[in-house]
């Protein structure tokens, strides 16, 4: 019988696997693979595990809340059995080993990446504020807040242009912009302009999953969240249709975005009236849509 890994080693947010995988792989696919992408993948994926463990360590430092009722004083024996005043410190210690282990792996990979591609340091200006926001949310035990989810999704989405930058920096440095890979189907938008359109659509989808998951799991039945989800997905779909009217997007993209918007309304509505889908069904559906979005842009 296999032993279950202790807390802190594997992120519990299984719905995040597609989010931390699809954007960076799409950036690699659109820019063309270069060996340095292996360092980028290692830094990003191991770094994600490291930040999860560090986040749990930060979270465990803050008590979940204090009861307003007076509690009877425990005896010395009871305090010893529960760990006494050092109980919280003992709980935090569970996350030290995974945090140090993953950091010890991610840090050399990151250093090696910057040695090979020092120009990537400019992306720190985009990622640093997101890391600070997410760390603050963990420290305040608000890791499931919209703010933290949005920061995490934004960071994951930005790995797409980072991967593309890594592949195409030499072309840009030589001024050979016409040779940049990636373009709309009709060739009217190419290179970085096309990549930012792809990034915007991918970011819209993954930001939308925050609303979608909340309206089906943690905030299900909450009409404010449902309305916010409806407005967000509707605005994104309109944006895609407007873009498609001015330049030819991949043929399947408007249809896929329409499906994404419809499912954001139909699935929670079905759950409210007929019974909520289990989280595993929600997660598998999002994996399928993530893969479809990846394939549409290839």
Image (cartoon, helix red, strand yellow):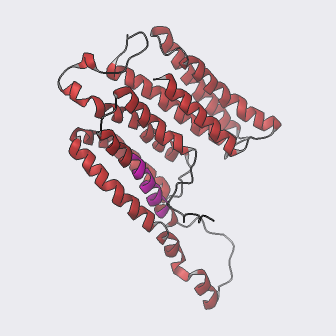
Residue 116 part of the magenta segment:
no
Q: Residue at x 55, y 17 (%)?
A: 252
Give residue 78's position: percent from left, percent from top.
Answer: 64, 86
Residue placed most toward the observer, 294 or 55: 294
State which region is magenta: 44-57
Residue placed most toward the observer, 2 or 282: 2
Q: Quadrant of the C terminus?
A: top left
Question: Is residue 291 among the parts visible in the rendering?
Answer: yes
Q: Residue at x 24, y 45 (%)?
A: 114
Image quarter of residue 237: top right
Which residue ends up furthest to the left in the rendered image? 174
Give residue 146's position: percent from left, percent from top.
Answer: 55, 44
Q: Is residue 63 left or right of residue 113?
A: right
Q: Residue at x 53, y 14 (%)?
A: 251
Q: Is residue 97 left or right of residue 76?
A: left
- Vertically, is 278 above or below 160? below
Give residue 89's position: percent from left, percent from top.
Answer: 49, 74
Give residue 284's position: percent from left, percent from top.
Answer: 64, 39
Q: Quadrant of the N terminus?
A: bottom right
- Vertically, is 101 above or below 43? below
Question: Is residue 129 among the parts visible in the rendering?
Answer: no
Residue placed most toward the observer, 291 or 58: 291
């Amino acid at each position: 019988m296999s032993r279950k890994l202790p807390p802190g080693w594997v992120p519990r947010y299984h719905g995040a696997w597609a989010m931390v995988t699809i954007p960076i792989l799409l950036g690699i696919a659109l820019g063309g693979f270069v060996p340095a992408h292996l360092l980028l993948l290692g830094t990003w994926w191991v770094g994600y595990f490291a930040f999860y463990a560090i986040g749990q360590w930060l979270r465990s430092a803050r008590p979940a809340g204090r009861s307003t009722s007076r509690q009877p004083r425990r005896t010395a024996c009871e305090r010893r059995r529960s760990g006494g005043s050092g109980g919280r410190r003992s709980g935090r210690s569970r996350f030290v080993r995974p945090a140090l282990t993953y950091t010890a792996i991610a840090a050399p990979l990151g250093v090696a990446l910057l040695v090979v591609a020092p120009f990537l340091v400019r992306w720190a200006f985009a990622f640093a504020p997101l890391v600070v926001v997410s760390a603050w949310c963990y420290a305040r035990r608000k890791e499931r807040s919209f703010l933290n989810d949005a920061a995490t999704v934004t960071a994951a989405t930005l790995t797409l242009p980072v991967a593309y930058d890594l592949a195409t920096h030499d072309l840009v440095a030589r001024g050979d912009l016409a040779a940049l890979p990636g373009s709309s189907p009709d060739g009217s938008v190419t290179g970085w302009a096309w990549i930012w359109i792809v990034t915007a659509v991918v970011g819209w989808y993954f930001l939308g999953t925050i609303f979608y998951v909340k309206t089906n799991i943690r905030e299900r039945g909450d009409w404010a969240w449902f309305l916010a989800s409806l407005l967000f997905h509707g605005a994104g779909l309109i944006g895609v249709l407007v873009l498609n009217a001015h330049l030819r997007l991949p043929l399947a993209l408007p249809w896929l975005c329409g499906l994404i918007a419809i499912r954001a309304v139909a699935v929670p509505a079905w759950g409210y009236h007929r019974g909520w889908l289990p989280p595993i069904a929600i997660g598998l559906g999002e994996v399928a849509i993530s893969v479809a979005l990846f394939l549409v842009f290839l």
